[in-house]
Amino acid sequence: MPEAQLDRFLLKVKLGYPSEDEEGAILSRFQQENPLDNLTSVVEAAELLELQKLCRQVYIEDSIRNYVTAITRATRNHQGVELGASPRASLSLYLASQALAAIRGRSYVMPDDVKYLAVPTLAHRLIAKTEARLRGHSLESIVREIVSTVPVPVEGTT
């Protein structure tokens, strides 16, 4: 998929394969009928929009906003990266951090929220240099390295 399209996905989450028992349970569900035919919504559209509004109300200190941009900007200068994260990637990490804080029951974003989401939010948007790929460096490991080198903001330093 072209990088412009990859940049439009908020997160990339790797699920892996189910265990043997889980896979058997999946097959059993399809024995009599297709369970996908009976899907029902878990949330109405209006409620989802309201939840999105609530997430946007989660407070982000200036220092944490700067932390988000420092991480994404560092991807643009990393020796193993051909194409770094775009401003859209910064916005995605910012918004995802707000949502995670809300899910965790907080009205504010912490640096740990940003760290936790950096790999699933940024790695799929980058293009590694050929030499980095040949050396076995994954985009995920590059983002982890960047996160480990960008100074973490100290509480109350806006």
Image: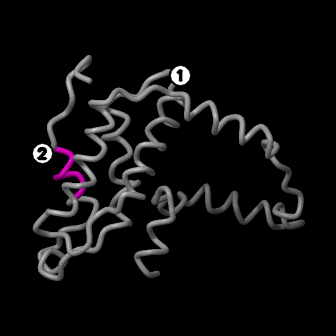
Query: Where residue 112 sits in the image (x, y, percent)?
Result: 32, 32
Q: Residue at coordinates 51% horizontally, 63% vertically from top-left?
A: 9
* In the rendered image, the vertical position of residue 101 relative to residue 5, given as above or below: above
**Horizontal relation, residue 45 to residue 137: left or right:** right
Work out whether residue 25 or residue 63 is closer to the camera in this orientation and state it. Answer: 63
Callout 2: 10 Å neighbours few (<14), some, many (20+)?
few
Query: Where residue 45 sits in the image (x, y, percent)?
Result: 79, 46
Q: Which residue is mark 2?
A: 149
Q: Which residue is mark 1?
A: 105
Please report the bounds of the magenta region as a residue range: 143-148
Amino acid under label 1?
Gly
N-terminal label among 1 and 2: 1
Main SS of the magenta segment? helix
Q: Is residue 87 inside the magenta stretch?
A: no
Query: Where residue 149 sits in the image (x, y, percent)?
Result: 12, 45
Q: Residue at coordinates 69% horizontally, 57% vertically from top-left?
A: 25
Query: Where residue 30 sits in the image (x, y, percent)?
Result: 80, 66
* In the rendered image, the vertical position of residue 77 relative to residue 43, given as above or below: below
**Horizontal relation, residue 46 to residue 98: left or right:** right
Quadrant location, the C terminus: top left
**Furthest residue toward top:** 156
Work out whether residue 122 or residue 87 is closer to the camera in this orientation and state it. Answer: 87
Question: Spatial distance from mark 1 to mark 2, Cα to Cα?
Answer: 28 Å
Amino acid under label 2?
Thr
The quarter of the picture where residue 61 lies is top left
Q: Is residue 145 inside the magenta stretch?
A: yes
Q: Residue at coordinates 62% horizontally, 30% vertically from top-left?
A: 54
* Secondary-structure class at tag 1: loop
